[in-house]
Image (cartoon, rainbow, N blue to C red):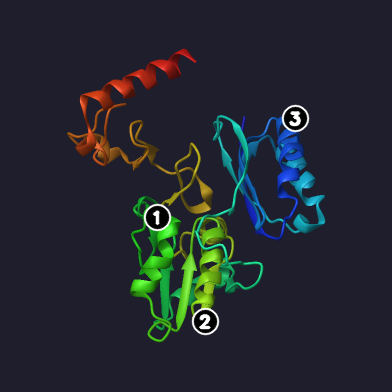
């Protein structure tokens, strides 16, 4: 079976977001949908997987709310189930920046469609920033983009305050996996006095889906938050897997490292290895095999 993976989000005022949780969860369960959906006052954010019919029905259910009528999912395929369970969660933010007053429903930067993105980031006057975290950027990014080396999105405002100045960097273009982080980041930059702020509409996923390899300025693969780990041009599955011990993406050459031990460690976590952690990993494996 081929599984349809649908990623979507929308910043929109949802004062009744708590009441939406149970009906949405029950409807997804009835369609045998797995994945994660976040609901907050500021909107909705989700990645779900299932059959073609199931995904279509859930998207129609969401769009039956007029506030979500224009929800635009990005879709890809998976040959094995990308998620083990369904989660519908209530949150303070659908993507956590940690500054509640930043509201993309009030102001947001200029959306740039994938077909125009190359032109924008090739402009020498434009400062291009990858708003994702370090472990994501390590797998791939756009040529010449700045890596803020953050461990979480909450650190992004501090990076901007310390490194990017509205006077010295009058034009800023940002991107992220599906568009949600850079959209919120653009709202934040505008609140900090930046005048020209651009962000990739639909994120890297839409760019990889619509821009050919010959024209692409993307280098490497794109980390995704499901069992596929990463995708490439055309949203084909990538070559990475996750370390069983620490969850860091690893490639085949990492497995040749003396620090790689299946289930136990990889080059990114071996320094933290202790006898107690080894025993915990082995116990986790036993429990998973018995479940």
At horizontal 45% and vertical 57% (from top left) the residue drawn is 153
At horizontal 38% and vertical 21% (from top left) the residue drawn is 284
Pointers 2 and 3 in contact (C-beta within 8 Å): no
Residue 128 screen position, x and y as percent: 42, 72
Residue identifier under label 3: 30
Q: Any mark on residue 133, and which?
A: 1
Quarter of the figure with residue 264? top left
Quarter of the figure with residue 158? bottom left
| Residues packed near mark 1 inside 10 Å, few (<14), some (14 to 19) or many (20 plus) | some
Tell which circle, 2 or 3, labels the residue nearer the N-terminal end.
3
Q: Residue furthest bottom?
A: 167
| Residues packed near mark 2 inside 10 Å, few (<14), some (14 to 19) or many (20 plus) | some
Distance, label 2 to label 1, CA atoms, is: 23 Å
| Residues packed near mark 3 inside 10 Å, few (<14), some (14 to 19) or many (20 plus) | few
Quarter of the figure with residue 166? bottom left
Q: Any mark on residue 196, and which?
A: 2
Tell which circle, 2 or 1, labels the residue nearer the N-terminal end.
1
Residue 114 screen position, x and y as percent: 56, 66
At horizontal 63% and vertical 54% (from top left) the residue drawn is 9
Identify the element where label 1 is drawn. Answer: loop
Q: Is residue 269 left or right of residue 65?
A: left
Image quadrant occupied by the N terminus:
top right
Pointers 3 and 1 in contact (C-beta within 8 Å): no
Q: How many marks?
A: 3
């Amino acid at each position: 079976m081929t599984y349809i993976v649908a990623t979507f989000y929308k910043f929109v005022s949802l004062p009744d977001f708590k009441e939406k949780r149970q009906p949405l969860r029950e409807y997804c369960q009835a369609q045998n949908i797995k994945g994660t959906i976040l609901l907050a006052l500021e909107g909705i954010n989700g990645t779900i997987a299932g059959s073609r019919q199931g995904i279509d029905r859930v998207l129609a259910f969401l769009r039956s709310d007029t506030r979500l009528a224009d929800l635009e999912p990005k879709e890809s395929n998976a040959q094995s189930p990308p998620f083990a369970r369904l989660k519908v969660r209530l949150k303070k933010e659908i993507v956590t920046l940690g500054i509640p007053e930043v509201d993309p429903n009030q102001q947001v930067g200029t959306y740039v469609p994938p077909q125009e993105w190359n032109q924008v980031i090739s402009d020498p006057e434009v400062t291009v920033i990858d708003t994702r975290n370090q472990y994501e950027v390590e797998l791939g990014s756009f040529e010449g983009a700045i890596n803020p080396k953050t461990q979480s999105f909450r650190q992004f405002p501090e990076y901007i305050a310390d490194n990017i100045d509205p006077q010295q960097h009058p034009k800023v273009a940002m991107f992220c996996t599906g568009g949600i982080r850079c959209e919120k980041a653009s709202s934040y930059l505008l609140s900090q006095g930046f005048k020209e702020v651009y962000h990739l509409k639909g994120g890297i996923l839409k760019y990889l889906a619509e821009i050919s390899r010959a024209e692409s300025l993307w280098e490497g693969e794109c980390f995704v938050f499901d069992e596929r780990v990463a995708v490439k041009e055309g949203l084909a599955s990538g070559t990475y897997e996750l370390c069983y011990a620490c969850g860091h993406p690893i490639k085949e050459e990492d497995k040749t490292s003396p620090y790689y031990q299946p289930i136990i460690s990889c080059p990114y976590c071996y320094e933290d290895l202790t006898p107690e952690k080894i025993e915990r990993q082995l116990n986790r494996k036993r429990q998973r095999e018995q479940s």
